[in-house]
Image (spheres, rainbow, N blue to C red):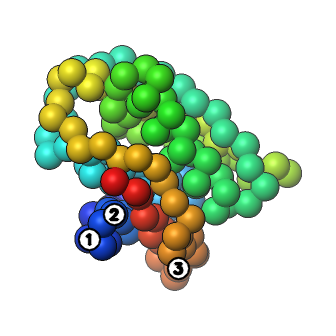
Amino acid sequence: MTFELRDHTADVAVEATGEALADVFEAVASGLSAAHCESIPETGDRFTVTVCAESREALLFDYLDELIYQRDVRGVLPVDHRVSIDEDGTLTLDASARGVPVGDIEAREIKAVTYSEMALERTPSGWRAYVVFDV
């Protein structure tokens, strides 16, 4: 799985790929982490999140929105993402991340995930996602 940060007018975008759907979700989340700061220390404890949605795009949006919420509530930058997705019936995502205390980093504020230009698609080699974040 890979990701690249992309310039996007006043915002920042993440383009990511992965072999499996969970891989591309992890890659986008890693891109969100990288959009916050240049380097990430090894501090912090793992925490878990669970998200359910009716579509894959909504699941991706809600997952990233939950990571931003956890950043604000816990005062941590979520990094080192691990994701599993159950696609039987309602889509359910179970994930964990290591929460780096925001006091340990020099971070740019990412305000929100947007649906603007969001793409999540199956490709011949796996999955591709493109997500724009409001800064």
Q: From what the image shows, is residue 76 above or below residue 36?
A: above
- Say left or right for 25 vs 108: right
Q: Quadrant of the N terminus?
A: bottom left
Q: Residue furthest bottom?
A: 124
Identified by mark 3, the residue type is Thr
Left or right of 106? Residue 3 is right
Q: In the picture shown, does residue 73 fall above or below 110?
A: above
Q: Is residue 106 in sight in this rendering?
A: yes
How far across and down, in percent of the image, does residue 101 sit? 28, 21
Task: Name which residue type carries label 2.
Answer: Asp
Label 2: few (<14), some or many (≥20) within 10 Å? some
**Residue 131 point in image, percent of width and height:** 45, 64
Q: Quadrant of the C terminus?
A: bottom left
**Tag 1: amino acid:** Asp
User: Quick check: marks 2 and 1 in contact, CB under 8 Å?
Assistant: no
Q: Is label 1 in a helix, a strand or a loop?
A: strand
The number of numbered discs placed on residues in the rendered structure image is 3
Nearest to N terminus: mark 1 or mark 3: 1
The image shows residue 87 at horizontal and vertical percentages of 74, 53
Q: Which residue is mark 2?
A: 11
Element class at badge 3: strand
The residue to which callout 1 is attached is 7
**Proximity of marks 2 and 3: CB atoms separated by less than 8 Å:** no
Residue drawn at (14%, 46%) of the image: 38
Give the CA distance from mark 2 to mark 1.
Answer: 7 Å
Residue, x 82% and y 49% (percent of image)? 90
User: Badge 3 is on which residue?
Assistant: 123
Residue at 46% across, 39% down: 68
Please provide percent x and percent y for residue 6: 28, 70
**Residue 27 in view of the camera:** no
Mark 1–mark 3 distance (CA, rounded to whole Å): 23 Å
Give the side of residue 31 with respect to residue 129, left or right.
left
